[in-house]
Amino acid sequence: MMSVMSDQQSNPLLADARLPPFDAIDAGHVIEAVTRALADARAALGQVLAVEGEPTWESLVLPLERMGERLDHIWSSVRHLHAVMDSAPLREAYEACVPLVTRFHTELSQNIELYEAYEAFVRGGDYAVRDAAGKRVVDNALRDFRLGGVGLEGKARDRYAAIATRLSDLTTHFSNNVLDATQSWTLTLADEGRLDGLPASARSLAAHNAEQAGETGYRITLDLPCYLPVLTFADDADLRAECYRAYATRASDQGPDAGRFDNGPVLEEILSLRQDKARLLGFESYAHYSLERKMARTPREVLGFLRDLAARTRPVAHAEYQALCAFAHARHGKQQVEAWDLGYFAEKLKQQRFEISQEDLRPYFPVERVIGGMFDIAERLFGVRIHPRNDVAVWHPDVTFYVITDPEGDRLGELYLDPFARAHKRGGAWMDVCRTRMRLDDSLQTPVAYLTCNFTPPVGGASSLITHDEVTTLFHEFGHGLHHLLTRVELPSVAGIAGVEWDAVELPSQLMENWCYEEEAVALISSHHETGEPLPAPLLSRLRASRNFQSGLQMLRQVEFAMFDFLLHLEYAPGCDVLALLERVRDEVAVVRPPAFNRFANTFSHIFAGGYAAGYYSYKWAEVLSCDAYSRFQEAGVLDTDAGTAFRREVLERGGTRDALESFIAFRGREPDVAALLVSSGIEPRAETSPA
Ligand code: ZN
């Protein structure tokens, strides 16, 4: 069928489709679409500000909610493609647009006229009659105006705008350095000689990598599905050391690529600009600024929380480390355990103690079975239905699309799942927003999510078998997805994960991980790829027993990262010695010290290129919430529909319309308790239940 198309229609990003037309979008569309979307947003803003008289909900708040969502329609597709299908033209177009989008958001957050319109709205009669969600939208907007520097004038104002633009460039640069440094190093081995100890799956991945690169033999890369098995299983200590050195020095002044993608100067400039920004806004530090959007109230409360966790964990972690060293010495004659030996001996000790390894579990977890079982669990717990759809355009053949409905068949939301690692795809796992639930004049826009993982890809036509760790990662991201997709809120800025305090936003994701260890749930997600048998009971009980293996050391590692991040943003001063600060944190917290060449901060994307600056502690903070919330399921039965329904009602559906603490109490009936995390990690014993 032929039709005459305008420019707008010929650019698929501008087609205003319900779902992004991924089969039609290419890098050449990006700049035009983003420029047009920004112009439309500015026009919409102009209309809002042109309205005379007292601003109302319909003249001010709703149009702005829609404007933000409309812009994100286009921008989220571009951002997503840049993350999962990176190419030189796309990266160039994306990088050209990032400053434009940032500038728009900065202008918006500094628009005094708009700020005054919100203030006038609060003074007027309309605010008082809004429901909690509506009030929250306006309260958050006013808070964000203040944090966005609306009160700044003259030079301070220009300075603020310059900082925002520069910071946005720097964080993109930081990410690109990490990606490039990760991809630039490879090690090709001509034969299997040095691969002793490595499981078959890791060998075939390395062989596959070599083949893809047009080489023969085995190619080791720094992508986690390839790198981790080497550090965990390779008997050749020199091989482990070589890979560790390359990995731990990525994007730094050390190691095989020293100075090539160095993030050292990048992260220092980021820290310095963040501090300038916080000071411009009248905060003592960037840490203080960061807490404005968090559940924790003061730096003292955060540091107190972390120090308490460290102190209660240290004795356990110390004993775990002693046990590891004694084992390496007794069984392997090792006098000194190096950084690249830790994972290797830990795996051996774990196997000896629990007779279990991630590799033993892999055959029971074909990825299709895990996904199907996970959906089954969500259906039982939350009363939803999930079905695949094959007629939706996706960006890569690995991607599947699913629809979530209520039992009556009404659509609640939709989901793209992109499970496997591949070239030009950012590492790690995450959930991102494609569409947010929103009431339109004559219809309801339902939410859409992207779930991205980097699991071991299927090799040679066989089904992909994933490790139990990967299963847990999938459940985690799906938890974020459910939070976004099951929301009942129809205002995008407080729907789903939007507007939720940062340190509470991991509650649903961390909660979901718990089902990966429950007998009833594992029966649904496991099925041996040859026999179809679910994970046998003895293996599951060993898996459960091994869950808290070295949990003290792991806890301290996370506390070390969290305290480093927080103090860095609390105490930063020009010329601050980042490595010295890290050493000081380790003096206080760590039981194990990495080698001096380790430059983990240079790839700490969570805090330098993600949203976790002065907020990495959020993982542990939210884990207290998730462990304590999960105890209700343990008491009621892990597939208990009432508990599931209550969680859906009180947490998942509420989004950011009320304080996270309020949602938690509504679900659990009381405030959260730190002990829940320590007990669940096996660091502290379960308290005796007192007689009723
Ligand atoms: Zn998460």
Image (cartoon, helix red, strand yellow):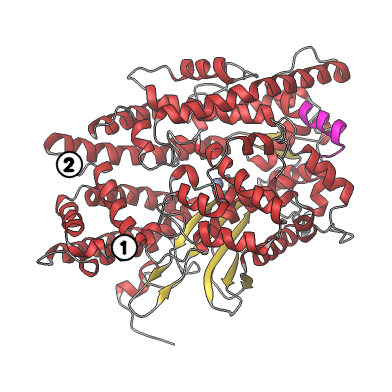
Name the element at disc 1. Answer: helix
Name the residue tied to disc 1: 65
The answer to whether residue 149 is visible is: yes
Q: Residue at x 53, y 34 (%)?
A: 181
Label 2 packing within 10 angstroms: few (<14), some (14-19), many (20+) = some
**Quadrant position of the N terminus in the picture:** bottom left
Name the element at disc 2. Answer: loop
Q: Amino acid at mark 1?
A: Glu
Q: CA distance from mark 1 to mark 2?
A: 22 Å
Start-end of magenta stretch = 345-358
Q: Please say if the residues under marks 1 and 2 sit with CB atoms less than 8 Å apart.
A: no
**Quadrant position of the C terminus in the picture:** top right
Q: Is residue 558 above or below residue 396?
A: above
Label 1 packing within 10 angstroms: few (<14), some (14-19), many (20+) = some
- Depth order, front residue of 281/504: 504
- View extreme (top): residue: 335
Q: Main secondary structure of the magenta part?
A: helix
Name the residue tied to disc 2: 151
Q: Which mark is residue 277?
A: none
Q: Residue at x 39, y 28 (%)?
A: 569
Q: Total marks drawn?
A: 2
- Depth order, front residue of 93/634: 634
Residue 579 percent coordinates (x, y): 48, 18
- Magenta highlight on residue 469: no
Residue 213 percent coordinates (x, y): 65, 45
- Depth order, front residue of 670/397: 670
Q: Determine whether the beta carbon of the residue marked 2 sits less than 8 angstroms from the nearest atom of ligand 1.
A: no
Q: Residue at x 64, y 53 (%)?
A: 475
Res. 61 image quadrant: bottom left
